[in-house]
Amino acid sequence: MTLSAAAVALSAGVIVSAAATIWAERSGRRPLFQRVKPLTTVLIIAVAAMAPVPVPAAYKTFILAGLVFSLLGDIALALSETWFQAGIAAFLVAQVLYIMAFKPGPGHPASTFLFLPFILYGLLMYFILRPGLGSLKLPVFVYVAAITIMAGFAAGRYVDHGGAKPLLAFAGAILFLISDSVLAYDRFAKRIGPAAQIVILGTYFPAQLLIALSI
């Protein structure tokens, strides 16, 4: 797998912008955070947009669309608490689009055995979060189901096809699952403390970049 000079430069820009986002969040510079977080995702979208059209071409379309909805989610979550549910809805759409990208083709059913660890993880995570969810029990259950299905399909795609790009997508899916798990646990179960955002953002941006590079 060879990256163009432009893709390398943009990926470096993503790393710098992601570091600036984490620094802005940790130092309480909210206006800067609200700018550089979406900027990081915009750079990741640019990485995906520059990728050659794969076979099937729909893969690039679904990944790009998922990144755009992720950008909308980033903007919503960076605004204020009142936009939290809108942000979660945008990320749910992103997960569905990633599912469409990673799902096996006709005649290649998903392996139940391969999915089992993800199903068990999703159920465990929801069981931990449930007492603190209040009226969000159903939306969070749907989101947990979506992201675990997404990760399961990414794993299955790598097992079925092998190669560098499916591996990048699988690694990105796992990092995304980690990021959202820490976010949900910190918000709904037990506060982790200042380190939470470092873990959340420090896995979220690499997740999205790896998924973009998987095109």
Image: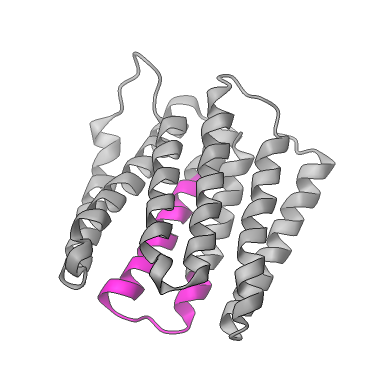
The residue positioned 38% from the left and 41% from the top of the image is 150
Query: How far from the left and from the top, in percent, is residue 101?
Result: 47, 31
The residue positioned 28% from the left and 72% from the top of the image is 188
Query: How far from the left and from the top, in percent, is residue 173?
Result: 46, 47
Residue 136, quarter of picture: bottom left
Q: Reply above or below: 71 against 187.
A: above
Task: Quarter of the image for the C terminus: give it.
Answer: top right
Q: Reply above or below: 53 against 62.
A: above
Query: How far from the left and from the top, in percent, is residue 14?
Result: 69, 57
Q: Which residue is nearer to you in this view: 9 or 78?
A: 78
Q: In the image, is residue 165 part of the stretch drawn in magenta?
A: no
In this picture, residue 196 sits left or right of residue 122: right
Q: In the image, is residue 181 part of the stretch drawn in magenta?
A: yes
Dominant SS in magenta? helix
The residue positioned 51% from the left and 33% from the top of the image is 62
Residue 50, quarter of picture: top right
Query: How far from the left and from the top, in percent, is residue 87?
Result: 43, 59
The residue positioned 24% from the left and 32% from the top of the image is 112
- Residue segment shown in magenta: 171-199
In this picture, residue 189 sits left or right of residue 88: left
Task: Quarter of the image for the N terminus: give it.
Answer: top right
